């Protein structure tokens, strides 16, 4: 009995030690703006990164995007020293490999960060596949900004090794990461994710698995209430923006921010929250926003939202 207990303690210690070890091998699924930004930051802080996506074409574009971003960083960080800047860029890019194979992507992963489109079924398909292929110690994290982490994790067999890592765009510039724990996330997993965020040079904040976490839980209702104000005819978008910038000291007004984020994004988040919490008035969709989305006026990216923009 004594030896059995000792063996159990040793096994538990080893499992705990694996989780407490630094997360050095990072896999990022999704090579869009968020995914490539996460990959860049991880590679720049000395992590070995595997960036995975559906085909080599999008991965090639992602590598080009990262290379261009690093060139801007190098120009600023190594001003007047082109050789040092080139060496920095080359070293960071060498830390990034790409693949279209889910199994290959996770074969050596310490942590997986998912940054694919905000569709629960897509995330379920991905996590079901990689849960069977990833090592037992691998921690899974989603970069979702609006979906419930627990619902995403439900298809896996590692509920205790699943959490949220919500980065902000553009990832290389924005310092914040929200670290989200579900009711099943273990302390060791949560601590490892907090340490990982800090190792990326980010300021980490902890949050439970509540809709929108911290930032979007406050920001989205604020944006929607601004739209309701205009919808009622109480003020114009221009005056609301001016009031919040000059009266509250905000760098952007709510309608400028809505156009920047994309009206479709805010509308999608509101609809999802309203479906899950139909009795919460803060989450009620706004007809004015929904109508613009239906008309294809999504903001700066389409040339028109609440304001008009010159297409580049």
Image (spheres, rainbow, N blue to C red):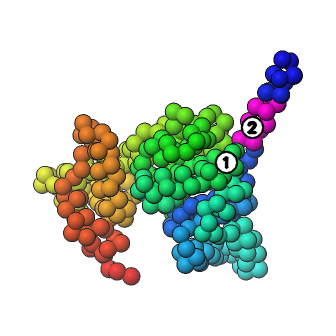
| Element assignment for label 2 | helix
Quarter of image, res 57: bottom right
Quarter of image, res 304: bottom left
Q: Please indicate whether residue 297 sits to the left or right of residue 54 in the image.
A: left
**Rendered location of residue 102, percent (x, y):** 60, 62
Q: Quadrant of the N terminus?
A: top right
Label 2: few (<14), some (14–19) or many (≥20) C-alpha neighbours in 10 Å = some
**Rendered location of residue 230, percent (x, y):** 18, 55
Vertical side of 2 occupied by 179: above or below: below
First-in-chain label (2 vs 1): 2
Q: What segment carries the magenta color?
A: 10-20
Q: Please indicate whether residue 20 sits to the left or right of residue 248 in the image.
A: right
| Element assignment for label 1 | loop
The Cα–Cα distance between marks 2 and 1, rounded to whole angstroms, is 11 Å
- The secondary structure making up most of the magenta span is helix
Label 1: few (<14), some (14–19) or many (≥20) C-alpha neighbours in 10 Å = many
Decide which of 252, 4 is in the foreground and name it.
Answer: 4
Residue at image position (51%, 33%) is: 183
Residue 138 numbered mark, or none: 1
Residue position marked by numbered label 2 in the rendering: 15
Magenta segment includes 17: yes
Residue at image position (25%, 64%) is: 293
Question: Can the viewer see residue 197 in this picture?
Answer: no
Residue at image position (64%, 46%) is: 139
**Rendered location of residue 214, percent (x, y):** 44, 43
Q: Please indicate whether residue 36 sits to the left or right of residue 150 in the image.
A: right
Decide which of 262, 147 is in the foreground and name it.
Answer: 147
Question: Can the viewer see residue 52 in this picture?
Answer: yes
Residue at image position (32%, 80%) is: 310
Magenta segment includes 198: no
């Amino acid at each position: 009995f004594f030896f059995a207990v000792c063996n159990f303690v040793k096994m538990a210690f080893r499992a705990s030690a694996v989780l407490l070890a630094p997360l050095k091998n990072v896999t990022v699924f999704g090579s869009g703006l968020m995914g490539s930004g996460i990959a860049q930051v991880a590679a720049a802080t000395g992590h070995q990164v595997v960036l995975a996506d559906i085909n080599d074409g999008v991965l090639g574009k992602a590598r080009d995007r990262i290379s261009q971003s690093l060139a801007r960083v190098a120009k600023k960080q190594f001003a007047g020293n082109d050789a040092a800047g080139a060496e920095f860029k080359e070293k960071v890019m060498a830390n990034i490999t790409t693949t279209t194979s889910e199994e290959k992507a996770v074969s050596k992963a310490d942590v997986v960060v998912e940054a694919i489109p905000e569709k629960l079924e897509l995330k379920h398909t991905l996590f079901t596949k990689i849960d069977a292929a990833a090592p037992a110690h691998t921690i899974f994290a989603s970069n979702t900004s609006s979906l419930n982490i627990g619902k995403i994790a439900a298809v896996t067999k590692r509920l205790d090794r699943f959490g949220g890592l919500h980065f902000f765009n553009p990832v290389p510039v924005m310092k914040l990461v929200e670290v989200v724990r579900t009711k099943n996330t273990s302390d060791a997993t949560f601590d490892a994710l907090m340490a990982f965020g800090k190792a990326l040079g980010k300021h980490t904040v902890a949050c439970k698995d509540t809709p929108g976490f911290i930032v979007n839980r406050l920001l989205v209702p604020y944006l929607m209430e601004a739209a309701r104000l205009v919808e009622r005819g109480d003020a114009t978008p221009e005056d609301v923006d001016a009031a919040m910038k000059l009266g509250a000291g905000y760098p952007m007004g709510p309608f400028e921010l809505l156009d920047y984020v994309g009206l479709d994004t805010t509308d999608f988040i509101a609809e999802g929250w309203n479906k899950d919490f139909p009795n919460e008035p803060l989450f009620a969709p706004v007809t004015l926003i929904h109508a613009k989305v239906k008309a294809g006026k999504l903001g700066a990216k389409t040339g028109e939202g609440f304001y008009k923009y010159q297409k580049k």
